[in-house]
Image (spheres, rainbow, N blue to C red):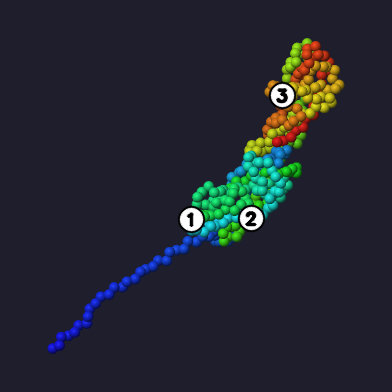
Amino acid sequence: MKPVSRGALGAFALVGALQIQPAIAQSTCWIRPDNNPSMTYDLNLGAVYVPRDAVAGSVIGIFEQPFGLISNEGRYVECQNDGVSVLTFITRSLAPIFPGNLPPVLGQDFNGKVYETGVPGIGAVIRLGHPFDGLAADAFEPQGEPLVPFMALLRANIAALPITPLQGQVTLVKTGPIAAGPHMVDTALFHGQFSLVPRAIDFHIRANVIQAQCNAAAVSDDPVKLGEWRATQFSAPGTTTTPTPFSIRLSNCDSDPNDDNLAWATVRLDGVNGSTPVPGVDGAFSLTSDSTAQGVAVQILRGDGVTPIALQQEVPIATLTPGDTVLDLSARYYQTAQANGVKAGQAKGSLSFTISYQ
């Protein structure tokens, strides 16, 4: 019998490799949650105050007032980057830039960054905060200061950078004369665009700008009576009489009730009817040309009865308060001649005053 031939037994191995395709990181920005490009941010500052006679470059309201805004639509931008690509953020102006030159605003040079608001004399400066201020490593790098308009670059490797709320600071600036009355600012200033998101931010600003001032001024006593004094009481130059208090009442004053931007009432005193400043004596002016007394002058002091008030220049006296503001002053005779040069008679002084609000 022939042996049965059995089939050969063998073994083999299945050799292979499971390859996992690495995910490719995207470098882009998009709008959450629905990628709809409509995003509007409204900054409403409410009532803000500025002294009526403040110079150009003065702050209206609060300097660099912070804000953090959620878009009206509830949307926000989110960016991610692979660390190789460079993403951009650019702000585009919707309002004109003020063309003139302004002095530094509390030490800050804002020239070229002040937006016109549609109200002559009122400008706006916007400084954006994180992630555009360059203070964090995993954020956009501003090319210069993050004062709108500007550009910023995102180079960092970052999986997700949500930009919400929109953070920054706003400063309203007086750029020139402002017409009388309150003024409503309501204007679009700029829009922002990101890589692959051509229009992601529309920024509007609103404010009610009120000029701090008063409507009327009245002197408590006119004339201010300095009393009767014997010529013999004036013994040497510099001798003074007891100060007589008086005041200038300012009525119907508009001023910041929160004291965020204080307005000072200033007074300028100028001699009239022959009264002129006395050289070398602060706050003193000569008697009028029709006075018969000699050897004395009239000196104007602050309400403390001690501190002279400079003549022919604006001098801050008091901060405005809503309603009425009282400027307390005082006056006295001041001996200008030697004792034998003091002559009895009628001693009158005459001044005009001008009130301004700084």
Between the C-alphas of marks 1 and 2, the distance is 26 Å
Between the C-alphas of marks 3 and 2, the distance is 54 Å
Whether residue 94 appears in this view of the structure is: yes
Which residue position is annotated with label 3?
308
Give the quarter of the image for residue 224: top right
Q: Which mark is residue 157?
A: 1
Residue 282 x %, y % = 73, 23
Task: Find the residue positioned furthest to the left.
Answer: 1
In front: label 3 or label 2: 2
**Cβ atoms at labels 3 and 1 below 8 Å apart:** no
**Callout 3: SS:** loop
- Residue at the spot x=71%, y=25% of the render? 302
Between the C-alphas of marks 3 and 1, the distance is 66 Å
Mark 1: which amino acid?
Asn
In depth, the one of 170 and 28 nearer the eye is: 28
Residue 94 x %, y % = 67, 54
Task: Find the residue positioned furthest to the right.
Answer: 290
In depth, the one of 52 and 248 nearer the eye is: 52
**Cβ atoms at labels 1 and 2 below 8 Å apart:** no
Mark 2: which amino acid?
Arg
**Callout 2: SS:** strand
Residue 151 x %, y % = 59, 53
Near mark 2 (Cα within 10 A), the count class, few <14, some 14-19 or many ≥20, is some
In front: label 3 or label 1: 1
